Structure formats: C-alpha cells, structure tokens
Image (tube, rainbow, N blue to C red):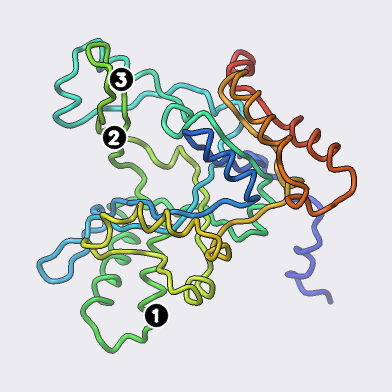
C-alpha cells in the first residue's frame, strides 16, 4: 500500500480556491523595484514589530518591540487590492485633525496607500518552494497567546533550557503578529505640505501576510540574527539592514528567475516607461538562458501592469 504522504506529493491540483494564487510584494519607491530586478533577488531587512500584546518581561523590563529580519508578501486576490476599507485613527496627532481630515483618513484606505504602488508578484507555488511562511495571527486574549508568553518568559528565567530550544522559541517571533494593532500612516494634511505620522488601529489579519525569513543555517554562517530584541541595537536596524544589501550577504537574499515573475506593478505610464528602460538595460549576465535575450526582455516587459489604467476595471 502506497503511503498517504507519497500520494499527496503527487496530487496534480495545488491551486488555492479561497485566496490568491499569487504573492505580492509592495514597495513605495521605484529604485527598490529597479534594484530587485537588477539583482534578481530581494534582500530582507530588519523591521520593527510591536509585541506588547504578548506582555513579555525580563524582570522589570518589558519587551514591547523587536526587529525581525524579513521580507513580506500578501496573497490578497487581485481584484481586492484596490478596495477601500475603513480604519480608526487614535492618538494625539489624530485628535488634532479637523473633522474632515479625520473622515478622509478613516475612509480612503487601500493596500496600495499603506505599502506602495510599486510591486512584484510571484506564484504562490514559488513562495512555497522558497520556504515562505504564512504569518500566524494571534488573538492576544487566547490561551495560545498566553501560553506562548509564559514559555518565552521562562526562556529568559531558566538557565537550564537547552540553547536550541530557547532559540526556537525566540525565532517563532518572526512568524507571529496580533490580529489587530497600531501602525503609523504618513498623510499630507490640507493645511500643511509636510506629511505627518498618524496612528491607525488596523486589522492585520486582512493583510494575509506571508513572510520570508532566512534559514537558521545561513544566518549562523553569516553571524546574523533573525530577531533583535536588544533595545540599544534596535535604533540601528536600518543601518544594519543597509549593510545586508552588500553582495557578501547574498546568501540571505530571496532569489528568483525572471520566469518566476507573474506581474510587475507600477503606478502610472511614466513609471512604466522607466521600468521598461530598466529591463532593456539589464546586462546579459542577469539571464540564466543566454539564448534570445531580447525575447526574454520582451516577455518581462509584457508582465508590467499600470495601476492607474487597471484600477477602473477592478
């Protein structure tokens, strides 16, 4: 009798029926997309994540934030990416806004508005092969979250816990997020040309996030940490992340072939012209197959979608 696991591995249908079959990675600046296409890889960065909902302490010190080495994707269906949704503003900056500004902030929200109008997208099967993991969203009031917090605090307090067990608990922080929480959104007010940061109470579960975190073996070989919890080091997370874009850290990067790309999204026609220029100027060494490189570039150009054009059809 054939083992069940072997039967599953040969099932021909692996599409997702209730969520997208595509993973989107969004960014705010065109140079980020240009760099990704030129390097043919995506470099992870340390991102500050709030963990105050876990109520983790080491003695009197509360751990409210950590920096996690990651790159984020979402599997939101294409037709929902531009859907508007409502949010609640909180805090002093929000309270200082006029009623009209508060109403505009609460109603005019899209995924693009938060994470950028440039994107690169891959098949979800590619993401599975590259060890991407769906984020585990925690209900802070659940017994699961309380048990995790208790285990985490014990790691701090008990010197007898083997290092590999302690490290496993710490690394799990890289794949969890609260169901809801506070994030900042920069907006430009009618009365001020400079953007201001407003705190937003957001449902994170709606982001349907998948995360790339480099493997433990690679992190160890490059003497790099998956999670930074030291409050004296976290302020330097951006500088540390910039250093990881150096070629000697390439093993940390998430690589891909141009054939793996499903879509390249840009905000408007001018951005499309710029990204076409980037693609046409890609050196031949970027292509694994050295045959018909002009055709391969044309195929890559054909994957460009202009947000301003297709919004009307969503």
Percent position (x, y) of residue 265?
61, 30
Q: Is residue 187 left or right of residue 232?
A: right
Quick one: label 3 or label 2, which is nearer the N terminus? 3
- Residue matched to label 2: 201
Q: Is residue 16 left or right of residue 211?
A: right
Give the image quarter of residue 201.
top left
Q: Position of residue 40 (x, y in %)?
A: 65, 50
Mark 3 and mark 2 in contact? Answer it, CB < 8 Å.
no
Question: Which residue is disc 3 drawn over?
Answer: 188
Check the image and report above or below for 90 versus 135: above
Mark 1 or mark 3, earlier in chain: 1
Give me the C-alpha separation between circle 1 and circle 3: 47 Å
Kindly tell me whether residue 18 is visible in this rendering: no
Figure check: 48 above or below 307: below
Q: Which mark is residue 222?
A: none
Q: Nearer the viewer, residue 144 or 92?
A: 92
Label 1 sits on a secondary structure element that is helix
- Say which quadrant the C terminus sits in: top right
Q: Closer to the observer: label 3 or label 2? A: 3
Q: Residues within 10 Å of mark 1 (few under 14, many from 20)?
A: few
Q: Secondary structure at mark 3?
A: strand
- Residue located 25% across and 17% down the image: 102
Alpha-carbon neighbours of circle 2 within 10 Å: few (<14), some, or many (≥20)?
A: some
**Front-most of residues 280 and 64:** 280
The residue at the point 26 percent across, 54 percent down is 235
Q: Is residue 22 visible?
A: yes
Marks 3 and 1: in contact by CB < 8 Å?
A: no
Rendered image quadrant of residue 81? top right
Asked whether, in this view, residue 265 is left or right of residue 155, the answer is: right
Residue 274, image x, y percentages: 62, 27
Q: Which mark is residue 165?
A: 1
Mark 3 → mark 2, Cα distance in angstroms: 19 Å
């Amino acid at each position: 009798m054939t083992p069940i696991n072997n039967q599953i591995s040969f099932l021909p249908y692996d599409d997702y029926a209730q969520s997208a079959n595509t993973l989107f990675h969004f960014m705010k600046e065109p140079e980020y997309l240009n760099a990704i296409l030129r390097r043919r890889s995506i470099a992870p960065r340390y991102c500050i994540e709030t963990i105050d909902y876990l109520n983790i302490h080491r003695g009197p010190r509360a751990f409210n934030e950590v920096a996690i080495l990651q790159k984020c994707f979402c599997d939101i269906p294409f037709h929902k990416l531009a859907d508007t949704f409502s949010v609640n503003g909180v805090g002093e900056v929000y309270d200082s806004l006029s009623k009209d500004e508060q109403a505009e902030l609460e109603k005019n929200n899209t995924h693009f508005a938060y994470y950028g109008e440039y994107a690169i997208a891959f098949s979800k099967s590619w993401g599975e092969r590259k060890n991407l993991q769906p984020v585990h969203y925690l209900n802070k009031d659940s017994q699961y979250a309380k048990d995790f917090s208790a285990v985490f605090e014990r790691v701090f307090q008990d010197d007898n816990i083997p290092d590999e067990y302690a490290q496993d608990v710490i690394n799990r922080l890289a794949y969890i997020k609260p169901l809801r929480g506070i994030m900042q959104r920069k907006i430009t007010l009618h009365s001020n040309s400079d953007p201001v940061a407003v705190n937003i109470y957001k449902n994170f579960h709606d982001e349907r996030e998948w995360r790339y975190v480099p493997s433990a073996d690679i992190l160890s070989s490059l003497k790099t940490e998956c999670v930074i919890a030291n409050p004296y080091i976290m302020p330097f997370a951006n500088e540390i992340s910039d250093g990881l874009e150096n070629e000697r850290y390439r093993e940390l990067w998430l690589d891909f072939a141009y054939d793996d790309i499903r879509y390249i999204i840009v905000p408007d026609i001018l951005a499309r012209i710029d990204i076409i220029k980037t693609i046409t100027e890609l050196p031949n060494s970027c292509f694994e197959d050295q045959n018909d490189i002009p055709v391969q570039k044309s195929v890559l150009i054909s994957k460009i979608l202009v947000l301003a054009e297709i919004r009307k059809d969503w």
